[in-house]
Amino acid sequence: MSAETPAAPGQFTRRRLQFRAWRGTRPFWAGLFVMFGGLPIAYFPYAHLQIGHLTLAMATTAGAGSLIIGVLLVVLGFSLWFQKHVRTFAGVAAILLALVSIPVSNLGGFLIGFLLAMVGGALAVSWAPGAPPEPQAVPEDTQGEGGAPAAAPYEAAPHESASYYDAAPHESAPHESADGADEPKDLYGTSPVSNGANGRHSAG
């Protein structure tokens, strides 16, 4: 195989291109942020931190509410991936659940889940499907040989055609006589040539 022959794309490249095409047709990042926002909201009320021999429990009286909010946010994130037509409803619901998690779930999972859910909901509401590109018309090649622009086809003007001269009658000029001689016409009868007097006028 020569060095100029491109290598065939591997399976990883094909999978990556397919995933990118799938991701571009839906609010992928909005769903991801919403799901990541639901995890800390549902986790922190049931977590126990070990500090040496001291166990710190962050459970609250509304632990069940925190679990419900976290699960709903995860479900909304999956809905944004696979049911993109409900993106507006899912985005508004994620924003409302993030606001409710502030008093219910340890300030919205120590503000981590709250911020992630708010950003994901805003992205879901603002996302819109892209329009397919319109086909562009291919311009005609108007260049001639050597890169010079091709000349427009010659169109003869009406007065340049031969039929124009054949059809138009020949009119003699005012200074031409009927037999074709270049003799001026005497319109007032004063020319000696036209009067036949050979330059002499008769007296009386």
Image (cartoon, rainbow, N blue to C red):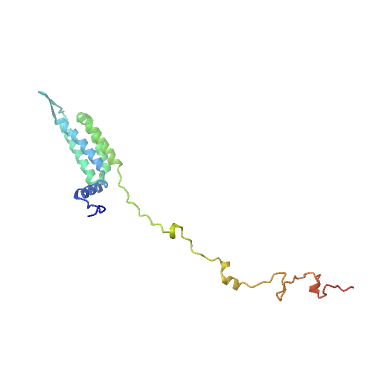
Question: Residue 27 location in percent, x, y?
Answer: 26, 43
Quadrant of the frame with the C terminus? bottom right
- Viewed as shown, does residue 96 lie left or right of 153? left
- Viewed as shown, does residue 177 lie left or right of 67? right
Question: Residue 85 location in percent, x, y?
Answer: 26, 46
Question: Residue 131 location in percent, x, y?
Answer: 32, 49
Quadrant of the frame with the N terminus? bottom left
Q: Residue at x 22, y 41 (%)?
A: 77
Hey, which residue is sitting farthest left in the picture?
53
Question: Residue 158 location in percent, x, y?
Answer: 56, 67
Question: Count of labels shown?
Answer: 0
Residue 142 visible at all: no
Please tell me in which quadrant of the rendered image residue 138 appears. bottom left
The image shows residue 151, relative to residue 22, as above or below, that is: below
Hey, which residue is sitting farthest front in the picture?
2
Residue 80 visible at all: yes
- Viewed as shown, does residue 112 lie left or right of 162? left
- Viewed as shown, does residue 98 lie left or right of 163? left
| Residue sitting nearer the eye, 78 or 177 | 177
| Residue sitting nearer the eye, 60 or 81 | 81
Q: Residue at x 28, y 40 (%)?
A: 123
Hey, which residue is sitting farthest top in the picture?
53
| Residue sitting nearer the eye, 111 or 194 | 194
Please tell me in which quadrant of the rendered image residue 144 appears. bottom left
Please tell me in which quadrant of the rendered image residue 112 appears. top left
